[in-house]
Image (cartoon, rainbow, N blue to C red):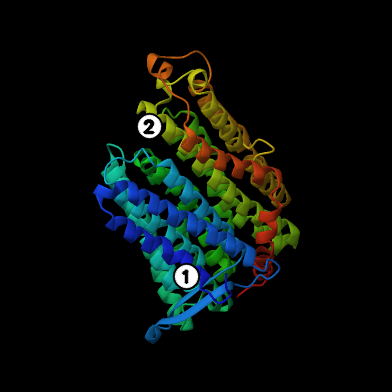
Amino acid sequence: MGANLPLLSILIWLPIFGGLITFLFGDRRAGSAKYFALAVAVASFLLSIQLYLGLDQANPAMQFTELAPWLPGFNINYSIGVDGISVALIMLTTFTSVLVLVGSWSSIENRTHQYFAAMLVLEGLMIGVFSAMDAVLFYIFFEGMLIPMFIIIGIWGGPRRVYASIKFFLYTFLGSVFMLVGLIYLYLKSGSFDLAVWAKLPLNAQEQMWLFFAFLAAFSVKVPMVPVHTWLPDAHVEAPTGGSVILAAIMLKIGGYGFLRFSLPIVPDASAEWAWLIIALSLVAVVYIGLVALVQEDMKKLIAYSSIAHMGFVTLASFIVFSMVRLDGNIDGARLSLQGGMVQMISHGFISGAMFSCVGILYDRMHSRMIRDYGGVINTMPWFAGFFVLFAMANAGLPGTSGFVGEFMIIIAAFQAHPLIAFFAAFTLILGAAYTLWMVKRVVFGEVANHHVAELTDINAREAWMLGLFAAGVLVLGVYPKPLIDLMDAPIAALVDHLVQTKL
């Protein structure tokens, strides 16, 4: 592949245009639409591998950059580029998108072409978010993602789908409005929408504080952080399986990514001042939401709450760095914390995506998500039970799985910041094990509970292939996380060096 090819643009626009063509197939040729959509998703994944191979990992600067004037009057440019952090998230996006399409192959029966089209457009917009270097472009991709997700939940969702999709849309949209005001203010101050210019822009303490809360409003809803998390369990429960997987595996990561790209570099002093708030909310998410997950009767709801608790780790890792950098001068601890946060994001992408896929496989067979309707599934679906137990163990943070690596790194870093923070963060491992294994015990093990479970059939080749790839991701990252850590090392080191300096 030539070095002069606009690889990033192809990665963004191939799925979007592929989605539009998939839509044109119409309902009569639904089979052809599915195969075409899968071919586009696989091509996008292969291109993202090319992105990984072509990246100079020692260089923290943005690479594969493309710049074209878009609205020159306002100095708005089509400016895209990636570093190690972006590449890791783009590869997660393209990989998961392939598995989502494979997983939805037979479960979506009406308007199939529209569903596959919406998934592809969503994939393109998410890649756009991870590669935008211009704030307006970022905002357009960030808001644009809402539309296909809104459609996916609203058309193919459960009985309360309209309520869930409107709640999802309103929450996210409201947060983003504050961010837009912040972006306009920064433009008026600097005359540019370039994120790199903003990272160097001097801002006083008051300006930083207001901007910090504007960014917090947008990204905390996305992660979601407590107390703006209530849309997520509703959206997950009502969304079709593919929608849940994308939502959990990638869309929640955009909040964490936003903090790394906006809050930390642009308003470092306000972030340092208010870090205690984020740390407190993250620990509440980790402990309180873990207790809420314990009492859930719906499998999807339980995994949704589990996602909120695990993403609490990511926000914790992003903000404990300040006390280490500013007070203790512990640069290595800060780097470890941010690396742990990123590994946790990627790992959670695999684990939550896999767990929602497992629930989807059960739902396709029995049309129930309630834990009480199952029991003894291992007797009729041994292969499925094996995969399900593996992902449950990974969710509980078992050593050897990816769930352990990120959480372990963050707990070690948190201990260096304050032993008490580490104690509460580690507490979640116990809670995570409690609610995950409690669900597995009641669903998978024991005697066959009823005749519906007795009639279940084990996973077919397509489902086995999908779960097998998820399992490979969980185990490879759990046993050998070094390539991922090396990929993100240079940009994280550069970010920590940037946080040392004050803008005041």
Viewer-nearest residue: 2 or 458 = 2
Which amino acid does the dot numbered 2 rest on? Asp
* Image coordinates for residue 500, horizontal then vertical, percent: 68, 68
Quadrant where the N terminus sits is: bottom right
Quadrant where the C terminus sits is: bottom right
Q: Secondary structure at mark 1?
A: helix
* Image coordinates for residue 225, horizontal then vertical, percent: 48, 49
* Image coordinates for residue 344, horizontal then vertical, percent: 60, 48
Q: Is residue 197 above or below residue 105?
A: below
Classify residue 222 as left or right of residue 170.
right
Classify residue 171 as left or right of residue 425.
left
Q: Is residue 221 above or below residue 460?
A: below
Find disc 1 in the rendering and name its residue.
9
Q: Is residue 279 visible?
A: no
Find disc 2 in the rendering and name its residue.
364
Which amino acid does the dot numbered 1 rest on? Ser
Classify residue 222 as left or right of residue 330.
left
Q: Residue at x 53, y 62 (%)?
A: 47
Q: Is residue 470 above or below residue 181?
A: above
Viewer-nearest residue: 494 or 100 = 100
* Image coordinates for residue 375, horizontal then vertical, percent: 47, 19
Q: Mark 2 to mark 1: distance in Å?
A: 37 Å
Displayed quadrant of residue 102? top left
